Image: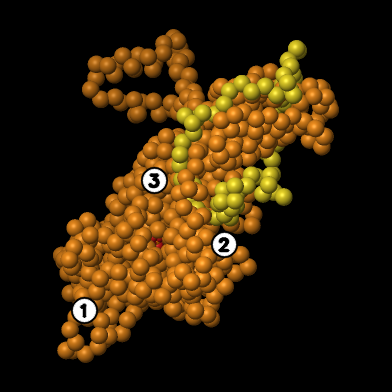
Amino acid sequence: MSETRTGPAPGDRTAIGITFGNSNSSIACTVDDKAEVIANEDGDRQIPTILSYVDGEEYYGQQAKAFLVRNPKNSVAYFRDFLGKEFKSIDPTYNHASVHPQDVDGSVAFTLKDKAGEDEAASTLSVSEISTRFLRRLVTSASEYLGQKVTSAVITIPTNFNDKQKAALVAAAKAADLEVLQLISEPVAVVLAYDARPEAEIVDKIVVVADLGGTRSDVAVVASRGGLYTILATAHDHEFVGAALDKVLINHFAKEFIKKHKIDPRENARSLAKLTAESEATKKALSLGTNASFSVESLAEGIDFQSTINRLRFETVARPVFEGFSRLVESVIKKAGLDVLDVDEVILSGGTAHTPRIASNLGNIFPASTAILSPSTSATAINPSELQARGAALQASLIQEYEAEDIAQSTHAAVTTVPHTTNAIGVISLTESGEEVFVPVVQPETAVPARRTVQVAAPKNGGDVLIKIVEGNTHIKVIKPEPKVQAANGTNSKAAKVEDDNSGEDSDDEFSDEEEEEEKREKAWKIGATLAEAAVRHVKKGAQVEVTINVNADLSVTVTAREVGAKGGVRGTLSA
Amino acid sequence: MATFVSYPLPSLPEGWSAEKDFKAVGKITADGATQRTIEPVGPHFLAHARRARHKRTFSEDDR
Ligand SMILES: Nc1ncnc2c1ncn2[C@@H]1O[C@H](COP(=O)(O)OP(=O)(O)OP(=O)(O)O)[C@@H](O)[C@H]1O
Ligand SMILES: [Mg+2]
């Protein structure tokens, strides 16, 4: 109803997608249904989430980031996660090199000089006000690029944002004259960005989204079923992050500098700020090249510093951080009750996802059949720094024509919370040797109502065909390697070793059995309970049978089967 | 959009019969399903929401 409308009418909207991160933000729009990340007036698509005030002039993005060295006391950075939070529950770790957050009536504020003039008093600004000012800058950039005023946006948020944080973000946007069409979760925006590519096929798959940012890493396991996305598990981490990789380089070069000059550049705030900025730049260079230089003018006490590092050295010193990323990904798969063999796709997202080593380490965890989508492992990967903003822009273009009330109703739990199948539902086929095999039609964790169709070969000679509808489950088959047998006297050296180990303290297995084969693990379907049997009669030789399984909202199941290209067939329903 | 499976279906066993050639054997119980939340994102979700809100089935939606 237009009388109750608070935002712009659908026809008057100009909508974009926004990611608002602690480290960086991005703005994106769609052109002919294709998402495009917008470069701001400085030419940046990753816009540092920083505001800096110099003589009353407001800077944001890359320019504000540059001011962290000279003007830290009037620069605010790493504040997004403070929105909607009580002061006592925030982690100010990353604010040491800029304005520190302070407690104002239990919530978070920053004090800085945002007005010109020596005598002007400093202002104490709430994190909401800071966010509003920053969002306003993003909206202004997008409006300038598009040539019309941006009125509305879809904004991405972490999966663990609570209602207070969401409300605070919506309010901060509103204060910047920006209507929030919808807040969508970051990993789902990422999956959408990939699924929206024209060449993408909508298939049932399990996707792991590893979003590796500057100050937080968020991983989600997403069941993608017929283009519907359900998050099965998430994990959040603040230790294994992009900033930790910067820290490794900061320490590496600081030690080199100390060796040469007996001065620790980490002890002086300004030196540390320079060291931090250059370490990040060097880290980024190592994502592309195998060598990178490190060079800071007047790093400490007027001494210039120049050095280089190669990728291998970086990967060695940063190994504990890299291992942390892998463990985080493994932990969330476990949390979802899944195995690495269940994962069809790993999408690396966020700035840190550019790092080749992270992708190659993940490649070692997953079977070869799992696609690792990152710049260094896939030629068709989308820039991981752009995924969220693209997803948000696509969603914005999908819903901008709806009334706000319609959007609210469609995103309501009554529509979104539905039963998901626990087991797979499928049909029985026969292998060459006549063994029964399970052919999945509806995958586990499929939201209902759902409809899936398969076409299965009929028996070689045609005739009457049995359609046996069953539940199915996967299990992991472990194939142990054959124990190695010593050629000469037939003694099993491994068995002898095991005896040894019982008496010894520490096993030296790893060193002695260099050639030992790894055990093989395979995913296999197990046939479960029978749900229904049906017959399709008089099928032609060499024909195919199409089986459709419809799981209805009340969990009743409708099965139809017919010979492809023929009339008739069979149809039946299982009550709920 | 259907997947194709090359392993053939079995032939109908000798003597198999059922009313209208369909025999219900089991069912999916509430235990065989978990309540979860679909993310309200993407074109396929919009289609889902439209069907849910207008109480339409897939085939009604196809028409
Ligand atoms: N090419 C690159 N190679 C390696 N790291 C990179 C590269 N580009 C950006 N990064 C790192 O990515 C991190 C920023 O990630 P992103 O842009 O996703 O930010 P964010 O989501 O705002 O982060 P957060 O909220 O976790 O602080 C920084 O640590 C940055 O140094
Ligand atoms: Mg992020």
Instruction: Using the numbered discs, state the Cα–Cα distance from disc 3 to disc 1 in whole angstroms.
Output: 39 Å
Q: Is residue A543 left or right of residue A31?
A: right
Residue at image mark 1: A123
Residue A310 can be seen in this image: no
Rendered location of residue A137, percent (x, y): 39, 76
How crowded is the residue under tag 3: few (<14 C-alpha within 10 Å), some, or many (20+)? many
Chain shaded yellow: B
Name the residue type under label 3: Thr
* Tag 2: amino acid: Leu
Q: CA distance from mark 2 to mark 1?
A: 40 Å
Q: Colour of chain A?
A: orange
- Badge 3 marks a residue whose secondary structure is strand
Q: Earlier in the sequence, mark 2 or mark 1?
A: 1
What is the residue that sits farthest to the top in this orientation?
A489
Tag 3, which chain? A
Dividing the picture into quarters, in which one does residue A48 lie?
Answer: bottom left
- Tell me the residue at 32%/68% (across/down): A278
Which mark is on residue A234?
Answer: 3
Percent coordinates x, y for residue A91 in the rendering: 23, 58
Q: Quadrant of residue A245?
A: bottom left
**Which residue occupies 49% across, 64% down?**
A404
- Give the residue drawn at x 65%, y 45%: B58
> Quarter of the picture for ligand 1?
bottom left
As drawn, is A319 to the left or to the right of A478? left
Task: Indicate the chain on which mark 2 is placed.
Answer: A
The coloring applied to the image is: by chain
Q: Amino acid at mark 1?
A: Ser
